Image: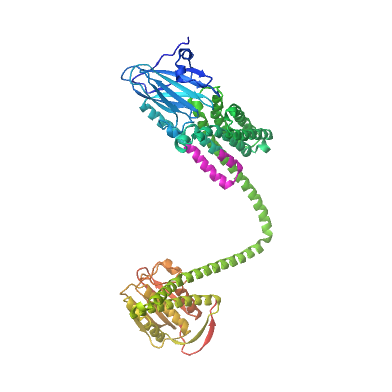
Amino acid sequence: MTAQAAALQIGQDTGKLALQSRFEVFEDKSGKLELSDLLQPAIKQQFTPLAGNLSAEYSPSAYWLKLELQRENSTAQKDWLVEMIPVMLDDIRMFQLHANGEIEVHKAGDHLPFSQLEIQHHYPLFQIHIDDTAIHTLYFRIQSTSSVFFRATLYDQKTFSEASNFLSSLIGIFYGIMLAMIIYNSLLMVSYRDISMFHYLMLSISTLIASMSVNGHIGLYFAPDWPWLVDILPNVMPRLIVLSSSMFMCSFLKLKTTFSLANKVFRFVQLNIVLFLVLTLAGHQPELARVGQYLGLVQICLFFPASLVVALRGYTPGYIVLLASTAWISGTILIPLRNLGFIESSWLSDFGFQIGAAIEVILLALAQAYKISLIRAENVRVQKQLLKVSQQAEYELEAKVRLRTNELNEVVQRLKKTDKEKNDFLSIAAHDLKSPLTSIIGMSELLLQMYHRIPKEQQQNYLSRINASGKRMMHIVTNLLDVNAMESGDLHLHKTELDLGKLLNDIALQYEEMLKAKDLTAIIHVEESVIVSADINAMTRIMDNLISNAIKFSPAGKFIWLTVSQHEGTGRFEVRDQGPGLSVKDQQSLFTKFSKLSAVPTAGEHSSGLGLSIVKKLIEAQNGVVNCVSEVGEGASFSIDLPLDMHARQQPIAVAA
């Protein structure tokens, strides 16, 4: 008869108990026995003490673990939690036998959806209630097509929360490192388009998904109702890790040229892994599991010598890969050793892979950075050589090339300027004509449709507004055509003897209504006999633009001064307002086409940005000058000066582009 283990005593100060070497174990090779069968004396006596944690590698058997618990006294905690590792066991059941004969059943395992677990936790977790000081017996039934290993810990509620929070923090740091490296290498891959960076990115992503899978976070957060996905990921992701790491080693270390034998071995392993992946997805995981573990173990052991040989042959990044491989191998090699039953499950075997992976991705990121620095250094060296050759050739043709380049640059700049001005011209035309044209169409349609129902006064109002919109369109079109004519050199001016004072008085009459509408007062001062040689149409356009601008930018109730005088042998026309004035920046672009000033018309009037450029072109074409004096908040004063001419004459002149 086998000696039975004593009941595990739970005291008042007990917060955490590792159940290592606390179980008795029985192997059900048929996998079909139920709890009632185990309670039979013949089988009950076959339980034997388990040294350490359960480690049965790949086995079709069902394993029963027996644990007896007893509270030392009535002050000890009644409610306890049993946390079990790993997640990937197919079926975990716990039977709690109470003193009154009642049997309480708990279920977990990756064949059961996470959403149906009795406690939502990333690891299997059962709650135990012990309400007396009698001995309570727990039976755990474990069966899986994956590697069978089992580690359990007993917690009270407070200690479990503290331990769980601490572990979650560590896992969160690991996930953060992996995500940072994935993002970093994604950017590198996009920038440099190097195949090794793609392989490393696949390795990082596979490592992250595999870690989330074995930690239970895939099932808990992403696939709570997809047990098939939770079940297959622990079998698929390790193979993807081995495949991507192998491909990374081949591409990053350039094994095809630096170590051809290792390259051939890795390629052979890669082909086998692809085959294993296909067969695993086809449902042959149980038959392939053990062979797959040995295959992965062989490749992991090849990383170290391959990177060492490449480094010794002069490829410096190989040393960093060597360090990274050492860290990764140290943690990763524990997994196949655990799965194959060589070592039992422990905190180091369960989390060593993630620790090693975190160190590896950081070191490999450094290796990538170092490789990039080598590429840049090589590029710099090549560029210097090319520059030297280029300078030698350039020396012979330097003068001609510089001359031709300058000519081409000037042509390009002119073309760019012309293209921009053309686009601005079309944009201004479309924008400025749209509003009055819309107004004309809208009001004319209204008149056509409702002519008999609209009062006469309202009809007159609509017609007046249509007329005003038409005049506005004509003004816009005239400005645009003038600019185009001046740019192309097709505008011809005819100088005649012109009385500036008389012209001003005639033009001022046209603005009486506009001045009244804005409550503005125009003060006109005209000296007698200010006769200049100028084109009357051009001068009319010039005065119109300057006076209309003064009205547009003047607030209600202000004054506008219009002056015609003689000044040092010239005839001068000046417009001064009390508007917002112009900043220094505005004055720098004041007479350029399509210029937009910081000041805006005070009543929302239209401004195309062409008026002042037209003024400058027209006045300079008549040998005159235009000036502006202004300060912000002090209004603006525009003046034009033309040579005095006492003799009437006509002389055609052309405006240069």
In the rendered image, the vertical position of residue 388 relative to residue 356, given as above or below? below
Counting from the top left corner in percent of width and height, residue 406 is at: 61, 65
Q: Which residues are magenta?
A: 175-202
Q: Total marks drawn?
A: 0
Up the image or down, 109 lies above or below 42; here it is below
Q: Nearer the viewer, residue 445 or 491?
A: 445
Identify the image quadrant of residue 249. top right
Tell me if residue 196 is in the magenta stretch: yes
Look at the picture and state if 35 lies above or below 118. above
Horizontal and vertical percent position of residue 540: 44, 82
- For the question of whether residue 290 can be seen, the reply is yes
Question: From this viewpoint, is residue 657 visible?
Answer: no
Residue in front for this viewpoint, 611 or 445: 445
Q: Position of residue 462 (x, y in %)?
A: 37, 77
Assess whether residue 256 is covered by the magenta stretch. no
Which residue ends up furthest to the bottom in the rendered image?
Answer: 647
Question: Principal SS element in the magenta part?
Answer: helix
Q: Residue at coordinates 68% horizontally, 61% vertically from top-left?
A: 397
Instruction: Give the quadrant of the C terminus.
Output: bottom right
Between residues 203 and 80, which one lies in front from this camera angle? 80
Using the rendered view, name the quadrant where residue 6 is placed: top left
Q: How is the image coloured?
A: rainbow
Given residues 421 and 495, the one toward you in this image is 421
Q: Position of residue 194 (x, y in %)?
A: 60, 44
In-image side of 188 versus 223 (left or right): right
Q: Is 210 situated above or below 338?
A: below
Farthest top residue in view: 1
